Amino acid sequence: MAFSSDKMKKIGLIDTHYLFCDLYCFEPGQTQKPHAHHESDKVYYVLQGKGMFKIGGEEKELNEHHITLAPAGVEHGVTNHGSQRLVLLVLMAPNPNVPHSH
Amino acid sequence: MAFSSDKMKKIGLIDTHYLFCDLYCFEPGQTQKPHAHHESDKVYYVLQGKGMFKIGGEEKELNEHHITLAPAGVEHGVTNHGSQRLVLLVLMAPNPNVPHSH
């Protein structure tokens, strides 16, 4: 794990043709702004801390060992609204950085 | 989490067109026998305990918070060789249960 005072830090763990897997490390107050991936699903698993997850129209707090899905095309973002560090395991598939034929 | 005295237990967490995500719960001594998925990558993340992972020709012990990849086409299996329960977060993509066009 690694943190940055500037902004939430992403650490790449696995990157294949089909998927990638990152750690997202948030200091208190840090945010990943809402955005969408049109053709990839994203899974968030909370390893440490708690965060506020906005997915589509819904906002919910998730704690350690909670998991949620941001489906392809749905806007999603995360804020560490607590006072402790937040660490997420993030999986995305298909890997949006790999060109796919359609 | 849930365990079975018969064999390692799979608990489905997320299942989409693109991926699935399960918990695998092993009592001491339980195994997932080596097998391969020809067109899907599998990611293992150790949530609790430790296990012996056989991936291709390699065998390695992984502990809590370790992650590894079983690439598509490569034989892989897991044994809980320790004396504590083993819990894995398992992600597979593409979802092998969804028909894909080629």
Image (cartoon, coloured by chain):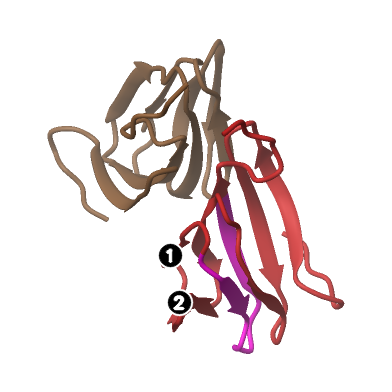
Chain colours: A red, B brown
Dot 2: element:
strand
Asked whether residue B9 is drawn in magenta, I would say no
Q: Looking at the image, do the residues carrying marks 2 and 1 touch, with CB atoms under 8 Å apart?
A: yes
Does A11 sit above or below residue A13?
below
What amino acid type should be assigned to the residue bearing mark 1? Thr
Residue A7 numbered tag: none
Instruction: Give the chain of mark 2.
Output: A
Question: Is A31 situated above or below A2?
Answer: below
> From the viewer's perspective, is the residue at label 2 or at label 1 nearer?
1
The residue at which mark 1 appears reads as A68
Q: Where, by quadrant of the figure, is residue A94 drawn?
A: top right
Q: Position of residue B84 (x, y in %)?
A: 34, 44
The residue stretch that appears in magenta: A74-91
Residue plotted at (55% across, 50% down): A40
Residue identifier under label 2: A62
Q: Label 1: chain?
A: A
Would residue B98 be visible to someone looking at this image?
yes
Q: Residue A5 is drawn in which quadrant?
A: bottom right
| Residue B85 shows in this picture | no
